[in-house]
Amino acid sequence: MAAPATSTSQYDAPRAVAIKRDKRTLLRAIRMALGIESAAVRRNTQTFNRNRYREAAALADYDALKDEARAIKERAINNLPDLLITLEGAVRARGGQLYIASTAADACRYILGVCQAHNAKLVVKGKSITSEEIRLNHTLQGAGIEVAESDLAEFILQVADEQPSHNVAPAMHYSTERISALFKRKFSTSEPLETGEELTKFARERLRQKFLNADVGFTGANLIAADTGTLMLVESEGNIRMSSVLPPVHISLAGIEKVIPSRTEMGVFLELLALSFNGKLSSYTSFLSPPLDDAPFALSGRPRKRREFHLVLVDNGRRKMRQDPVLQESLYCIRCSACMNSCANFQTVGGHAFGGEAYVGGIGGAWEAGTGTLENARFSDLCTGCSRCVNNCPVRIDIPWLNEVLRDRLNRASAGSPLASLLGVTALVRGDDRRASAQKIFFANYHWYAKWGARMHGLSNGMIRNGLARRLMQAAVGVDARRELPPFPARTLVRAARELSAPVRVGKRAKVVLFADVYTNFGLPERGIATIKVLRALGADVVVSDAIPEGRAALSQGMIATAKKHARHTADALLRYLDEGRDIIVVEPSALAMFRRDYRHLLADATRFDLLRTRSFDPLEYAARLITSSGRPANDWFDVAHSPVGPRLFLHSHCQQKTMGGAAPTETLLREIGFDVATSDVECCGMAGSFGYKKEYYEMSMAVADDLYGQVQAAEASGAGGVRALVASGTSCTEQLHSGLGRPVLHPIELLAAILKA
Amino acid sequence: MAAPAQTSLVDLFVARATEAAAKVERIGRSAADVRAAVTRATDGLRSFVVADGDHIPAEVFNSLRTIPRVIPKPTDDQLSTADAGITEAFAGVARTGSIVIAMGPPLRSTASLLMPLHIALLPVDRIVLRPRELFEPKGIGKEALGRNLVFATGPSATADMGPLVRGVHGPHRVHILVLE
């Protein structure tokens, strides 16, 4: 099927928007990606992702493998200086050369020198992101050397003059139709260039001649063992084998962080990396300790040379990253691409928007900042902190944290504005954080505006609905005029809870405090009230905390000093309840995720974090516990027949809730009660807290949500029964579902409250 | 080791290698059995090459070289145009359906790479369960750690042009003969 003809001339070329030092370039890149690349990227990332999930579930010791890999990388980066010395000995002992280049230019100069010493005319090259980082092709071609990119994806990119958009499949933004059009434009040939088979055959035949006649074979390296000088080379096409086995000279380029202590440790990574190649081992993984023993390949008429091997390790900022308490973690990356494949934003725009010149996706910001300048990491603004990458990373890198810290540093590096300072002063923002944009300060301190909004809810709700006021909001703080901020309730949760009639019988089975998070308290207090009713019915003694910002909003805007302050105050307040023996119930999943995950970074005291982490719960998760411990069936309390929306549900779980493992208990309990539950498998709804409210990201947010809307419609279309009631735990998921489908959305706890037996 | 364990390893290997789009046959390990199987597998091809082995007796390879279409001592030009290459597999990995090729003896790196068809001879007792066993300094791993290895799982493949296409730069077809 042919794709509809798209005029691409109205969009920037990917190269023109590769480096995103300012927001304007980022927005142009997003526009280009949504216009041209989105469909192919989504199809390909989601295929990778699905296969990975399936295979990871079948791998019984997946978590143990991740722990092992993490420990190896930690050790390696810790002992890097020693490892480099050991490696040099190992490479030399086999007759190879190790060169450690301090900068990109230094690496290029050395590699060019080796090529020129051999009077090389043709270099065949395997895929290497590091070579993109150092712009190697530019150097070699500038010196008159032909560089043949031999990975088919890199071949496409070389023909198109584009930067990679993905670690593993760098041309995944190209559909077959677009490759066909590109090749027809660039090559004059009578061969058919329509299908994947034909395009592959065309490229294969051209490249075959290059392999057989190359003077130098160039490869990257996925890992390098210091003790034996062994390179691990992962691929599926055979081009890396050709490049490393046939030509007399083999040059391998990698960052210094790719060195691990020992070859015996490579097996762990082989098994983990397999998951990223559609869940299987990729066709070929080579473990070579070059130079190889047998004679290199030589067609008749070509000189038969001795083998020569050069391992070029590049620093280019990595030693500095190693000294950086936060960026250091990014050196553990094995470039498997799991983070980008599991990222809803990346699935929608790909690495030409969510990426820089060489490095892309959630992990890409740290790398572009580390090997380039901080401003190059501007695209990491597209990380919403949804945390779906966190459990998928084989070396357990906390990628959202890296991006929050980068955002913090970018805020500080910016000039600030008078409006931002004014907003900052009024909302008691930490002085250090006042350089963030007015938009960031607004979202980070939503609690402050919400407090005043709720006090004057009649006036403020009028303004929210008023077109002029909304346009003003858009102009001043960048809230998209097409979005409605949640209206302020007449009674906040804290007030409404006080007015609730006292429980008939004070619960003895458990004592809890319901944390009045900002979103529930000032936005959707009925969810909190429902929580109180259900937990009391299940025998719990429930009290409600004061409304305190827990820091999520500030953290997501990269205002870490403010987030730390919020975290400290929240912890102070909640620990008193813990001392009384109360567990903490949190309605808003992104607030719960703060206690469970993010406070690790925000609270100075690890034991306080551990207390909060282990004793805070989602309402349904806690309800399920109470039911289980009672030994009675859920239907003793709930009757699905009373459901005001019927028994058919579509449950969309919140991104951070899924990462915390909190989605499954909700689904299980709803089913146990007798609901017919269909679920989404999208990684995130696309609203992601404040992200979708921002005027510059509105289109992208809605494009992400198309997936979710499509799944709701598909679930309703399949089988008999039609419409399903929408259920979601997250405040922003609720708004996103509501705005796209125009239907009410319930929190599952509201549903439970409605079907409580008398 | 108990016999049943080995049996299930082979079954798993056959299933997974087949899933990875390799063709797998279980045959006897005598020179005559192997020669007959290779003759069938190369039926219709113009020319093919045979690499030396480490673990399979030399007489097996010598007998293969008596098949008429074998190029006995191929030049590199001939290697680049031959239809098939026959090599020993250093090991097999059951869980992933991979064969492991050890480089070294003449031709093995090219005979498993340059031709459209790669035929691999895999002794049944050299199948392990997991990839990482070839990185542990015991059993078969002890030898593996000192070699240049390629884990090959099915034919070369790409999805860079859109759909999955089998047969890119490396072999388009893989035929594994498990020697029992």
Image (cartoon, coloured by chain):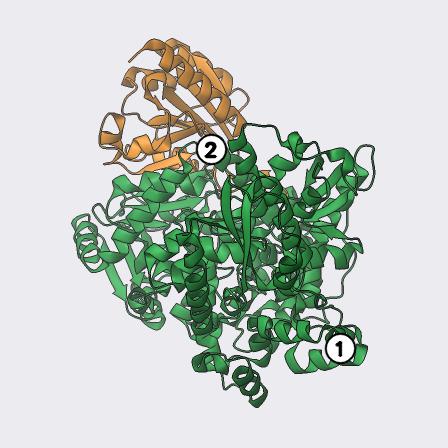
Chain colours: A green, B orange
Quarter-of-image position of residue A25: bottom right
Quarter-of-image position of residue A147: bottom left
Q: Are marks 2 and 1 on the same chain?
A: no
Task: Name the one closer to the observer, A192 or B153.
Answer: B153
Measure the alpha-carbon separation of dots 2 and 1.
83 Å
- Residue A579 place in picture, x, y as percent: 39, 53
- The amino acid at mark 2 is Ala
- Chain holding disc 1: A
Whether residue A308 can be seen here: no
The label on residue B82 is 2
Q: Residue at 72% across / 45% down in the picture?
A: A711
**Residues packed near mark 1 inside 10 Å, few (<14), some (14 to 19) or many (20 plus):** few
For residue B113, above or below residue A532: above
For residue A379, above or below residue B156: below
Horizontal relation, residue A508 to residue A575: left or right: right
Are the two marked residues, 2 and 1, in contact with CB atoms closer than 8 angstroms? no
- Residue A380 place in picture, x, y as percent: 51, 66
Horizontal relation, residue A284 to residue B164: left or right: left
- Chain holding disc 2: B
- The amino acid at mark 1 is Leu
For label 1, the residue is: A459
Q: What is the tally of numbered marks visible in this picture?
A: 2
For residue A87, above or below residue A268: below
Quarter-of-image position of residue A685: bottom right
The label on residue A467 is none
Q: Residue at 48% across / 44% down in the picture?
A: A276
Horizontal relation, residue A631 to residue A138: left or right: right
Quadrant of the frame with the C terminus of chain B = top left
